[in-house]
Amino acid sequence: MNTFVNFFIQSTTAFVSTGTIWMVSFFPLDQTYLMSSAYALGGGAIAFAGTKALTTQRFLKQNQLSRKEYKYIHHHLKEADKKIKRLRKTFFTIRSVSSIKQNIDLYRVVNRIYSITKKEPKRFYLAEQFYYSHLDSLVELSEKYAFLASQPKKNRELSHSLDETRDTISQLSEKLEKDLHDVLSKDISQLNFELDVAKLSIKK
């Protein structure tokens, strides 16, 4: 859901309604300034709430979701947003040259999955492993790696732990790639169908 656009529409509707109600109350209906203002503020609040309800209902209908489902998904998206911010902060603290490209690629995949799901919440069900397991594991491992990598002196055991953590993150990146593929599965199937149709047209 495009929060900014919806808020702009709701605010504009409320502002216009407030001004119109005040003018009607003060001039044609000959109400006092205070009463006109009270009616206008009340009407504006009702207009804002009504517009919000309509835009939300339209969004839910487009995505074929119930309010309960969207509330559940929205909760997980908010939690994921916090985790992704932690991940970004952690990646900035890791100075290892060998990890920079991997971290950039990982962040792009993670952010892409989140962005797609936020825009189309129903795809959340295609990325449940990402939200329930893989994102948590990535954040925890990355924070552990950043902490170990920041130590001034590294003995053999510490270096081994760093290598092992980096290898595990690499394996996890494959899971994340699959999560992204799952989220995009509908688009990939549609594209393949359109390609098949196009090839048949070319042959004819």
Image (cartoon, grey):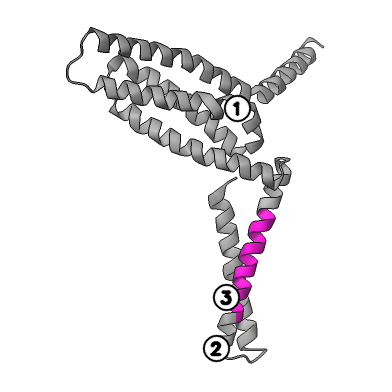
- Image point (46%, 23%), residue name: 137
**Residue 128 picture quarter:** top right
Residues 98 and 21: in front is: 98
Tell me which residue sits at (63%, 37%) in the image: 120
Mark 3 touches mark 1? (CB < 8 Å): no
Horizontal side of 27 relative to 166 (left or right) equals: right
Mark 2 highlights which residue?
33
Would you say residue 46 sits in the magenta stretch? yes
Residue under numbered circle 3 = 41
Q: Amino acid at mark 1?
A: Ala
Q: Amino acid at mark 2?
A: Tyr
9 or 133, which is in the foreground? Answer: 133
Res. 185 in view: yes
Q: Is residue 128 above or below residue 76?
A: above
Q: Position of residue 46 (x, y in %)?
A: 64, 69
Say left or right for 116 vs 107: right
Residue positioned 39% across, 34% down in the render: 86
